[in-house]
């Protein structure tokens, strides 16, 4: 994988890995809770690997992200032996931190670099959008861990079983569709929801402005 991913195609691989991870959350309809957790762990680890390889061009962030992955793997292995519920929350928090770091590294490469516009940058803007939706889905799941009644329409159960619904709600909010079958019921959840809606509204304008500026800067 490392020999195939370059700075000219890294976002193609990253976007593909994110799409697979997002779609895999829908397997909760056909898999038992235990098996779903195993599948999500495997696909999450694969996504981590693709992210790290894709962002190897950001050495400082790569080292930080590798530490997060090592801690996540350690917790996942420890949970197999000790079956402590707190490890689930800690693993979820590490996932959130990892994808936040990935989001920042991607934004730097896509929105804050000069030069001509490439297909890789365009695909990278899609990866950035997917990361935004995924990060907010994980935020909602963390909120749900601390406040089981924070969302009407999301039942308090293991976060792996709620991942698909959280991702669905996140992208419905990010795109400001607002179907309404899941709603925030406390102030903290409501704040997270309207912040995501604001970011979703302005994301397209920011990306378009950045790409247009880069195009105008071409000789």
Image: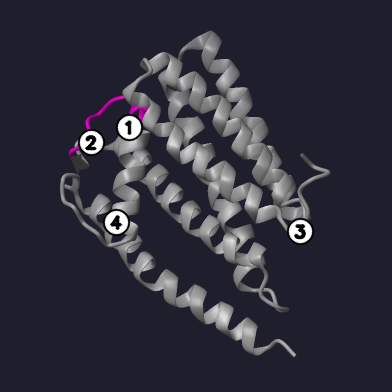
Disc 3 and disc 1: Cα gap in Å?
Answer: 35 Å
Which residue is the site of mark 3? 7
The answer to whether residue 143 is visible is no
Which residue is the site of mark 2? 154
197, above or below 147, in the image: below
164, above or below 86, in the image: below
Label 4: state its secondary structure: helix
Left or right: 142 with respect to 102? left
Disc 4 and disc 1: Cα gap in Å?
Answer: 16 Å
Q: Earlier in the sequence, mark 1 or mark 2?
A: 2
Disc 2 and disc 4: Cα gap in Å?
Answer: 15 Å
Q: Earlier in the sequence, mark 3 or mark 1?
A: 3
As rendered, which of 14 and 48 lies closer to the eye? Answer: 14
* Magenta-colored span: 153-161
Which residue is the site of mark 4? 173
Which residue is the site of mark 1? 162
Residue depicted at x 33% and y 41%: 166
The image quadrant where one finds the C terminus is bottom right
Label 2: state its secondary structure: loop
Please tell me whether residue 117 belongs to the stretch shown in magenta. no
Query: What x and y, as percent, mark residue 41?
Result: 53, 26
125, above or below 48, in the image: below
Query: What x and y, as percent, mark residue 130?
Result: 47, 53
Please identify, in this view, whether the residue under mark 2 or under mark 3 is nearer the observer: 3
Residue depicted at x 57% and y 16%: 78
């Amino acid at each position: 994988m490392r020999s195939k991913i370059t700075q000219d195609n890294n976002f193609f691989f990253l976007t593909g890995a994110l799409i697979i991870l997002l779609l895999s959350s829908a397997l909760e309809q056909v898999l038992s809770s235990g098996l779903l957790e195993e599948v999500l762990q495997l696909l999450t680890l694969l996504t981590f690997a693709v992210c790290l390889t894709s962002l190897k061009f950001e050495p400082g962030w790569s080292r930080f992200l590798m530490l997060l992955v090592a801690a996540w793997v350690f917790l996942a292995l420890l949970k197999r032996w000790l079956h402590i519920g707190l490890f689930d929350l800690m693993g979820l928090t590490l996932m959130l931190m990892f994808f936040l770091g990935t989001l920042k590294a991607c934004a730097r490469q896509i929105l804050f670099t000069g030069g001509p516009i490439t297909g890789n940058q365009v695909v990278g803007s899609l990866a950035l959008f997917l990361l935004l939706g995924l990060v907010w889905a994980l935020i909602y799941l963390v909120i749900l861990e601390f406040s089981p009644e924070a969302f009407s329409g999301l039942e308090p159960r293991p976060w792996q079983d709620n991942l698909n619904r959280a991702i669905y709600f996140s992208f419905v909010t990010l795109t400001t569709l607002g179907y309404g079958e899941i709603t925030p019921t406390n102030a903290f959840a409501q704040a997270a929801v309207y912040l995501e809606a604001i970011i979703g509204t302005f994301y397209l304008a920011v990306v378009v402005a950045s790409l247009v500026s880069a195009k105008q800067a071409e000789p």
